[in-house]
Structures are given as C-alpha cells and as structure tokens.
C-alpha cells in the first residue's frame, strides 16, 4: 500500500483557509487519493477524493500535483466545527487510515 | 446521519467472554468494512465484505470473525475477549467497492472489557 505522510498537527484561524498537505510519493497510476476527517470519537466522515485532476465539492477542494506525489486539502473558510483529525488515504484494495493531521481551528 | 446503523452503541463485558457487534449498511450498499480504534489510536482496518463475500482482510485477530448476511447486514464476532480489545469498533458501507464510491461510517460501538 502506498504510504502517506502528513504533519501531525496544524492550527488555523477561524474564517481563514486551512491547507492540509499530504505526501504520497509512492502512489501508483491507478490509485486514488481520499480524504476523511474524524471529529472527536465520531465515525469518520468522507470529504473528497481524486485521481489526477483537482476536485471541489461543497466541503473542500483537493489539489493534486501533476506528478501525483503530493496533494493538498483546502477548507476555504475554516470554522470551529472543522476542528478534527484529517486523514489522507491512498486507496489500493483497502481503505487504510494513517495517523492523520490534527487540525485545530481557533477563534 | 450517515445511514449506517451500529448496535449496540455501548457494550461492557468481562474478559474471556464473546460479543457480537451488528452493522446495518445504508440502503443499497453492497460493501461493509470493519475498523477498530483503541483509545487515542488510529483506525485499524479489520475486514471488508462485498455482497456477502470477504473482499479484503487487515490485521484481524484469529479470535475475531465477521460475516455479511444475504440481507447485507454484517456482524463482527469477538471472542475470548482481553482487556486490550477495549476500543471503538466502526462499521462503514459503500455502494460498490472503493475507489468507485465513498464509504460512509456508522457512529461506532464502544466496547469495554473489564
């Protein structure tokens, strides 16, 4: 399984954009990048996924570099409710969660 | 509400006992996934079923087993329980198999072994 590397923690001011990086330098051509988040001990919540092109939905944007070795999840206007652990996952045949980035949004 | 239902929400049992956790997937979803999350630990993938058949396996202990029934609900059986099995157990479901669609998670079953 392709390994992902994320910073363990990040801070973001409320109302500002939160940019969460993920490195996946060993990704293969047919492997998707998924982002999930987990708020406290709730069930993880799907955010977005992509293969090659940048993607946007009502929650976030996903920017994947041209060589696909890294990606960035962007929360355009972070709120206090976005405080959570964010997981970047490279899907092969299993949805494997790493250690994620703990995002703290402060007032 | 993700549409995935897990029961019970909380379970307290003694070491050496056996328990069964139940998962009802979203209507129409054929895939079911099970995860274990110990206190302050990451999500450990246990097993995945697709339309009744085992699809992928993670680091699931031999004392643990799972199955998906014809009505697509799934059960995770944990036996000879140890203190270290205390954890949140999450079930997720998806319409097909990832990566063609996203997986939706239930709210989990909190298992406490005493």
Image: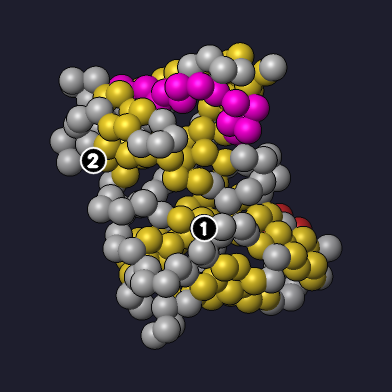
Horizontal arrangement in the rendering, residue B55 relative to residue B83 (left or right): left
- Report how far apart the C-alphas of labels 2 and 1 lie in the structure: 25 Å
Is A97 located above or below residue A11 in the figure?
below
Horizontal arrangement in the rendering, residue A24 relative to residue B65 (left or right): left
Q: Which quadrant of the figure contains the N terminus of chain B? A: bottom right
Q: Residue at x 51, y 64 (%)?
A: B3
Report in which chain the residue with disc 1 lies: B
Is B74 located above or below residue B113 in the figure?
below
Image location of residue A11, percent across then percent down = 60, 16
Location of residue A28 (image quadrant): top left
Residue B54 visible here: no
Location of residue B17 (image quadrant): bottom right
Q: Is residue B109 magenta?
A: no
Q: Which quadrant of the figure contains the C terminus of chain B? A: bottom right
Q: Residue at x 62, y 59 (%)?
A: B108
Q: For the residues carrying marks 2 and 1, which lies nearer the camera in this image?
A: 1
The circle drawn on residue B10 is: none
Q: Name the residue carrying label 1.
A: B2
- Both labels 2 and 1 in a single chain: no
- What are the residue bounds of the magenta stretch? A69-84
**Which sits in the foreground, B87 or B61?**
B87
Q: Residue at x 54, y 71 (%)?
A: B23
Q: Name the residue carrying label 2.
A: A31
């Amino acid at each position: 399984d392709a390994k992902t590397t994320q910073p363990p923690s990040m801070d973001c001011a409320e109302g500002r954009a939160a940019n969460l990086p993920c490195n996946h330098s060993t990704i293969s051509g047919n492997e998707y990048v998924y982002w999930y988040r987990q708020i406290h001990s709730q069930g993880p919540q799907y955010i977005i996924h992509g293969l090659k092109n940048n993607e946007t939905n009502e929650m976030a944007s996903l920017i994947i570099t041209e060589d696909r070795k890294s990606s960035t999840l962007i929360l355009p206007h972070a709120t206090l409710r976005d405080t959570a652990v964010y997981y970047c996952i490279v899907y092969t045949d299993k949805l494997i969660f790493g250690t994620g980035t703990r995002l703290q949004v402060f007032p | 509400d993700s549409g995935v239902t897990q029961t019970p929400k909380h379970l307290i049992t003694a070491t050496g006992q056996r328990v069964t956790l139940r998962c009802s997937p979203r209507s129409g979803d054929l895939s079911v996934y099970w995860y274990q999350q110990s206190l302050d630990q990451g999500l450990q993938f246990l097993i995945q079923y697709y339309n009744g058949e085992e699809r992928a396996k993670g680091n699931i202990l031999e004392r643990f087993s799972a199955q998906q029934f014809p009505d697509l609900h799934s059960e995770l059986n944990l036996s000879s329980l140890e203190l270290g099995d205390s954890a949140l157990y999450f079930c997720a479901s998806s319409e097909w198999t990832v990566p063609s669609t996203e997986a939706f998670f239930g709210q989990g079953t909190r298992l406490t072994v005493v």
